Every structure is written in C-alpha cells, then in structure tokens.
Image: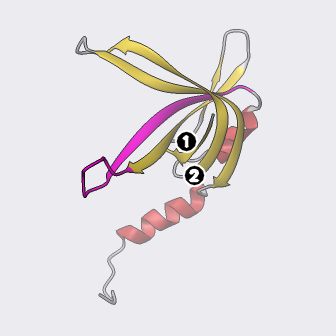
Amino acid sequence: MELTGRLIANARIATLADQRKVVNFTVAVNDFFKPKGSTEGKQVTAFYNCAYWMNEAIAQRLIKGGIVEINGRIYTTAYKGTDGEPRASLHCHVHTIKVHSTVKKESQKNSINELTEPLADLPF
C-alpha cells in the first residue's frame, strides 16, 4: 500500500542483538471527508509506526515536518492500554521511501529564533 504523509518526529535507528539496524519513524496521514447528510466536512488523522530495514542512511533525511511517500505492508497490532481498555496501533513494514520535502535542522532553528524576537513593524 502507498501512503503520503508528514513525519511527526525525527527518525530513530535501532540496533538489534544480531547487529541488524532498523529505521523507525511515524507518519501522519490526513483524510478529509463529508459524512452523508452533513454540511460540514470531517478531518481524520491516522498515525503509522513505520520500520525500514534496507538502509539506515535514510534516517538523516527523515526529519520532523518532512513529507514522505512510503510503500509497504500495513498491519495492526492490538494491545491493552494502561487503563486496561483494548487499543490498536497501525504499522507499516516499509519497502520504499520517497522524500518529497525535508526540513533543514539549521533553518528550523533559525526560524524558531526569528519567531521569538519581538516584531514591531508588522503590516497588520
């Protein structure tokens, strides 16, 4: 299945006991629809916990806020939450990744610094 979404955090590399490495990241996919008989639309966001086993070098390009297109096998995992209620999570065993946009770490820091400075001459 193919999904396009936004990374909600920087990718993490995990090393297993047998020294294999896996890149873990989470993708948020937005969906918008209008229920039958309703005048208002509804937006739903699904979060997919992804695992990519091919090459850990991609992790440096998977930065929070970037847009990626992934292709892989989607499955669910059921578990009991801390409150004892049944829960489920969506996962994707990723075969291919296309990075459509990325956020540079330095420019991200600069834009945050610029936003914290007082701005006196705003046009509105």
Secondary structure of the residue carrying numbered label 1: loop
Residue 21 shows in the view = yes
Query: Is residue 38 found inside the magenta-colored segment of the image?
Result: yes
Q: Residue at x 22, y 15 (%)?
A: 83
User: Who is closer to the viewer here, 15 or 51?
Assistant: 51
Frontmost of labels 2 and 1 is 2
Please provide the residue range marked out in magenta. 33-53
Q: Is residue 75 above or below residue 97?
A: above
Crowd class of label 1 (few under 14; some 14 to 19; many from 20; radius 10 Å): some
Q: Is residue 34 left or right of residue 6?
A: left
User: Who is closer to the viewer here, 43 or 114?
Assistant: 43
* Amino acid type, mark 1: Asn
Of label 2 and label 1, which has the lower sequence position? Answer: 1
* Amino acid type, mark 2: Gly
Secondary structure of the residue carrying numbered label 2: loop
Location of residue 54 in the rendering, given as x and y in whole percent from the top left corner: 76, 28
Q: Are marks 2 and 1 in contact (CB under 8 Å)?
A: no
Location of residue 34 in the rendering, given as x and y in whole percent from the top left corner: 33, 51
Return the residue at label 2.
Answer: 66
Return the residue at label 1.
Answer: 10
